[in-house]
Amino acid sequence: MSEKRENWGSKLGLVLAMAGNAVGLGNFWRFPYQLASNGGGAFMIPYFGALILMGIPLMFVEWNLGRYGGKYGHGTLGPMVYLQAREGVKPKSAALIGALAGAIAFGVTVLVNSYYNHIIGWTLGYGVSSLTGAYMDPSMKTVDFFVNYIQSPGKVFTFWLISLGFLAFVAMRGVQKGIEAFAKIMMPTLYVFGLILIIRVFTLDATVNPDWTPIAGLNYVWEPKWDQLTWKGALAAAGQIFFTLSIGMGIICNYASYLKHDDDIVLSGITTVSLNELAEVILGGTIALPIAYVFLGPEGFGAGVGFSFIALPNVFRAMPAGQLFGSLWFFILFFAGFTSAIAMYNYLVALIQEELGVVRQKAAIMVFILYILVGLPVGLESIINKTADLAYLTEVDNWVGNYLLVVLGFIEVCVAGWLMKDKALVEINRGSYWKLPTWFFKLFIQFLTPIVTATLLIFSTRDFWKAGYFKWVPDFVAGTPVLIPWVQAGRIVVIAVIAIGFFQAYNTIKKKYGHELESGKISVRM
Amino acid sequence: MTAGAWLFIGPAWVIILGACAITLSALVKHSSK
């Protein structure tokens, strides 16, 4: 690689960038829906359980994978996992494990971002629409406005390409002047906007129905509903923890690869988790649903896409200064989404820099072109078919945005706990301001986290099977025949991208450590 | 708001805000050394 490896400029910048990496759309629209439909306040029990049993330990594991791999010049997961796995198994086996991990991370960063970039385009489009008042006309239903938006090539492509262009611009500027600099602006702004909206929520009058007050809305969300707290809810909590912390994706590892070898991991990792939970539980858990409750009542809650882009615009229509508050909400989503999308973007920039030896600017342009290619089916499905099912997105997301995160998390924790073993603890604590005690490593990273993650994987597989996701024509699309080819194409794309990722990761490992694979002995140590 | 809701919101806010305050101040303290 011709360029010197970049580093983060400051601790605060690093933590804000990592927080930006973690804080995303999942904090503001996925979490509130999961909370409300899986037992309300009672959901916090499996949620905090999953945070402690999986989220926090895996955060340490991923920071360590990244910082250790960065010492050897790696910014991608395949070689990072190889370097740690080779401490416990023969290099050839370690290379296969590394290639598998690299394959999943490649799949996630290529394919999750293929649709995530579109969604942040929508948030940008809606932010602008809030400022211009475009969806304020009461004669047009908000659902029709949304359908019209995603079926309109002009709107879809304009805001998608602006978002992609902005991502490329930030990526080109590098770690310090790009990612860190923009995180230092976007993350504090996001929290400030969130605080303004919380204040707005709690100063709203119950204008539609005297029972629909913001406090009643908060109560509706948080009141524990023990009968709704099922095994499915526990799985939802665990999945939410993976998604919200961006673990099982390789992108936390990539950011950590820009740490110096004796930079702190433990305190910085815990700070990242805290900042993510601030955005999730406090902002995400307090803004969207109570605000919807005041204007739409208990029936106003909904899931993800529909809630943010269909239900909430109704709320902003009805409230005083709704254009302003609507724009604050959608720009929160844009900043949250952007700072996560740039992490996935940068992973691929790092991969291309390492694989092809090209400079950052050129790699960033190549990733821009790649994202246009893989993002086209996402945007075109609704435009061409005049549908709003987003079936291609759903299929791809089921695998790379859901299931495979847990597979990768399981691989990572087993490598740290059972292959690298005590050396992993030594590495985690190297330079760390707070030291991880041995009992924590043994109890969590070696024992509880692998067991809980494996359990999550087994039951997720069972749930996927029962929901018909494994079928060649998954159940969710069986009723819309015109979209079946799109879903099947999505599955083929997932398989193809992961296969490419596997060979790419193995190739990278073999290029640098080929003699280790042949001799069966570790010879490269830094 | 019901006691049930408070039982969950209260501790959640305290833990998270507390964690943010402790970790951020510790980070600032260590960074300035």
Image (spheres, coloured by chain):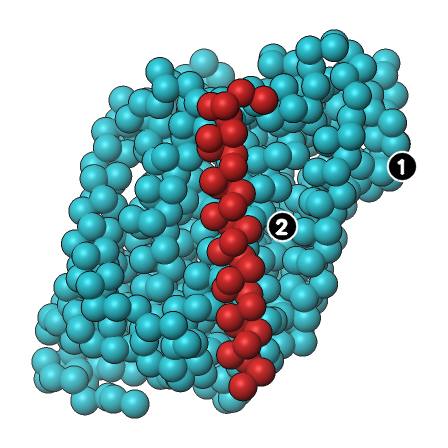
Chain colours: A cyan, B red
Q: Chain of mark 1?
A: A
Q: Residues within 10 Å of mark 1 (few under 14, many from 20)?
A: few
**Residue A41 horizontal/vertical position (percent):** 46, 28
Label 2 or label 1, whichever lies nearer to me, is: 2
Amino acid type indicated by mark 1: Thr
Q: What residue is disc 2 on?
A: A336
Using the image, tell me which numbered label, if any, was put on residue A132: 1
Q: Residue at x 21, y 68 (%)?
A: A438
Which is nearer the eye, A133 or A512? A133
Give the image location of residue A40, x and y in percent. 47, 25
Q: Is disc 2 placed on a helix, strand or loop? A: helix
Question: Relative to residue A118, is residue A395 depicted above or below?
Answer: above
Residue that appears at 58% across and 47% down: A279
User: Where's residue A17, x and y in %?
Assistant: 57, 65
- Secondary structure under badge 1? helix
For this rendering, which residue is in front, A144 or A479?
Answer: A144
Any part of residue A160 in sight: no
x and y percent of residue A145 in the render?
76, 24
The residue at 62%/68% (across/down) is A179
- Residue nearer the viewer, A121 or B23: B23
User: Is residue A25 depicted above or below A10 in this figure?
Assistant: above
Cα gap from disc 2 to disc 1, whole angstroms: 22 Å
Q: Is residue A358 left or right of residue A82?
A: right
Quarter of the view holding residue A525 = bottom left
The kind of residue on which mark 2 rests is: Ala
Mark identifier at residue A433? none
